[in-house]
Amino acid sequence: MPIKTTIKKGAYFDSVALMQVAKKLNSVPGVIDSAVVMATKENKSLIKASGLLTAEVERAGENDLAIAVSARTPEAAEAAFNAAEELLNKKPAAASPGSDRKAAGLDDAVASLDGANLAVISVAGRFAGALAADCLDKGLNVVLFSDNVPVETEVALKKEAVKKGLLVMGPDCGTAIINGAPIAFANSVRRGNIGVVAASGTGAQEVTTLISNEGAGISQCLGTGGRDVKAEVGGLTFLQALSMLAKDEATQVILLVSKPPHPSVMKNIAAAVKRIKKPVVAVLLGGEVKEKVKKDFYPARTLEEAAYKAACLGRGLKAAKAKELIYDMNLRAEGLAKKEAAKKKRGRFLRGLFTGGTFVGEAQVVLPEFTGPVLSNAPLDKKYKLKNSVALSGHAVIDLGEDEFTVGRPHPMIDFSLRNKMIVSEAKKPEVSVLLLDLVLGYGANLRPLDDILPPLAEAFKANRELSIVASVTGTEADPQVRSKVVRGLEAAGVLVMPSNAGACRLAGEIIRLAAKR
Amino acid sequence: MKLFETELKVVNIGLESFRQGLNDAGVKSVQAQFKPPLSTETSLFAKAAKASGRVEKANRKALDRILGAKPALVGMGVALEVIPGMRRDLILHAGPPVTWDRMCGPMRGGIMAALMYEGMAKKPEEAERLAASGKIKYAPCHEHGAVGPMAGIISASMPVFIVKNEAGSNYAYATQNEGLGKVLRYGAYSRDVIERLKWMEKTLYPVLKAAIESLGRIDLKSMVAQALHMGDEVHNRNRAGTSLLYRAIAPAVIKTCPDPETAAKVLEFVNDNDHFFLNLSMALSKASLDAGRGVKDSSVVVAMARNGTDFGVQLSGTGGKWFTGPAEVPDALYFPGYTKADANPDIGDSAITETNGLGGFAIAAAPAIVQFVGGSAADAVNYTMAMYGITAGENNIYKIPYLNFRGTPTGIDVVKVAKTGILPFIDTGVAHKNPGVGQVGAGVLSAPAEPFRKAFEAFARGL
């Protein structure tokens, strides 16, 4: 397929603005794929994977804007370029008196918002570090949503923050809830007495919504960014957040969510947990806490188990009560699984198409005991690395939020188009028997998920009469999308919806297990 | 810790949709625009940050001199006699140095007008040949203590105002403003243009000179401070400044001019030209900023000037070096019959007012001309507010009533410009790109990035 490129020299655009342009370009008839990116080294290597790296893009510099379009016809490519031009040149609406004023920069913003205490930064990673440092200088806590911030920068920022008694959440911190306010990708949850420290954004969304839907509530949810618990960063933010929650009177239960920290970091976290006089629940996806940390320390294998344990503790119940909640859910799932398994004749394999990275990890924790080995583009164990993230084989779960899929596109929680394509193409494969999906609601996510996902689901069912589609919906009734509405819409389309991702994984796994026995 | 016990107030930088959740939760937030830094050489920012103590001290010193300047109109004279280094074969022009072959239309037209005015050429064709012959030398006004609006042409016999910084010993010079329409400074060279210049030399100049001499001095600084309270920013609006000047000189003109008819004509000329004060607000700015020159390690901008081809910047700490880049065409309101296609790239020394905390930097004081900046008074306030982010300080004398008499943002710090990507905001008139046509509009623009990037990089390297 021919690829056409234009380069605009020295034209800086915010990456988010560019993603919005790319999304629109992909909807131009005849356009197969497109990338609209600043031609940085990182972006070049990333679009190479999608086959859009032309010689012109290769030659462009990091202050140049590159637009690459692969289209069925030259006319379609032309239409896409025209659309891009129009979108990029669109003038923002002029400010009028009394309207919400945009500050010209950080100085202006801080001057115009008396008592500002938190900065949320989502600019391109190569600019984010310096900006975060300026925010710390001005006494602001920072949520650094941006990724691609060098690890040395992260360490320097966090050391400075510790010195100043401020918190740097991130880089790559997708979710936080502070004083009841959802920050970035977050849900509208009940306030309560459970404080969360999370090195994973989706993990934080799953536990906070499960807790809220269970009738308990969140005091604070502090994100750290996934790299915080690695050896280089040493858990600087994680430990700071822990100590803040330990001192916070509104927090009575603490819940930790992370991938397994580096052993040296784990040692420090465990030592800090030991000193806290509040019950602590922890889920380290893909790892486990072997040592006995303290009497009221509750390790959990899944986000679901951790959330329910924390919810029970928060409501003054025993943590063990969580097992009963999960047992009840399983009971219902078994009936569904039997019915679904009975339909299967040819299909054998499960394909999980996820927008939330942590769910991919959790799926790999839950599924193997039902299905045997599960491959992934984000494997917990390198042994199970998928050779090709697009041509799936065997039981496979993939993370569509990985860089290989997101360059020049909005996050798959916002823009469903790539996953929608895969839902249909996977369903058409006769060896596929179960599709496992996540649907994340809340602020930052797609505001009309049903409009976008129902058409490909219908097409999938039509293409594969044996197909089962199992999904979890992460969200609350107070979210802008309203969880129950989304669940009803999916169920009406024939999707089996479970309250949690772990629950959805167990149901999907059980269908495969029972079908294999037949 | 404190964060949990205080009201959350958020500065959001980047994805604007993140404010939705905050709004729904009743949390106050403000969106801050983000612009990338001007330079990609991150090591230079690190170097500047490391030297920030030294630089801030130097900037304080430069700014103290600029703010402490006491510019007053102390007299008038003929360019050849009063401007240092002036010669018969030298023509001064606006902006950074530029050769004849690179000069834009209006500047060439202005030079042709000057040569005819000086009697060195009779016809435009002859003037053009002489101008290109190499016999005439060109130099920036700025390098001779002078400033000129638009083409900024000063030739040997032109009368000039003499403005003295009474707190120091430096002088600044500027010609008398010709009025609007077809005028030399916009590159017009027709017979009526030359005739007006001759009248200004033979009639206007001696009368004003005598009046100023009888007054001794006119305090321009307090005049500008008052004009700001009366709705001027003394760049694109000079109505109040001109009125204040008129009030100051009228009695002296009556007293010193022997012929009432001539006195009336002179006063009418000043009264009819709302921009008469512009050249004085420029000379006042030049006299103030020159006081801030030559402070080692200071990143304060002491001149922004355009010649219609290039935009040039000079810093206090980098001597007489110009940092230049292509001048841009202003985003303007055009007079009927003209469009952006007719416009010349930005031209004139008048950005010296912005450099001095006036003009675009003080536009919040001039609600009457907000149609240039988007139409609402809030837009004007926003532009001034944005400039506080790139200046070394605030003015002690020039204050904005609407901002509770906050001093105007003054002393552009090139490090802040480079770091924030916020570029100085400039009010300007727009010249037709062809010589001889004149003014076609007025508007605003942000200074181009390139001169500031170069200035920052050279400054930081020198630290």
Image: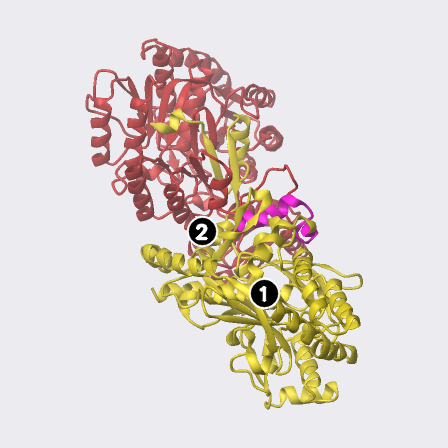
Quick one: label 2, few (<14), some, or many (20+) residues within 10 Å?
A: some
The structure residue drawn at horizontal position 56% and vertical position 75%, both measured from the top left corner, is B141
Q: Which mark is residue B101?
A: none
Residue stretch in magenta = B369-387
What's the residue at 69%, 48% (across, down)?
A: B375
Of B155 and A130, nearer the camera is B155
Q: Quadrant of residue B148?
A: bottom right
Front residue of B378/A289: it is B378
* Rendered image: mark on residue A46: 2
Dot 1: element = helix
The quarter of the image holding the N terminus of chain A is bottom right
In the figure, the yellow chain has which letter?
A: B
Residue B129 visible in the displayed image: yes
The residue identified by callout 1 is B282
Q: Amino acid at mark 1?
A: Met
The residue lying toward the viewer, choosing from B180 and A492, is: B180
**Residue B399, relative to residue B24: is it above or below?**
below
Residue B91 in view, yes or no? no
Q: Residue at x 69, y 71 (%)?
A: B256
Judge left or right: residue A181 versus residue A455: left
Residue B324: where, in percent of width, then height? 51, 70
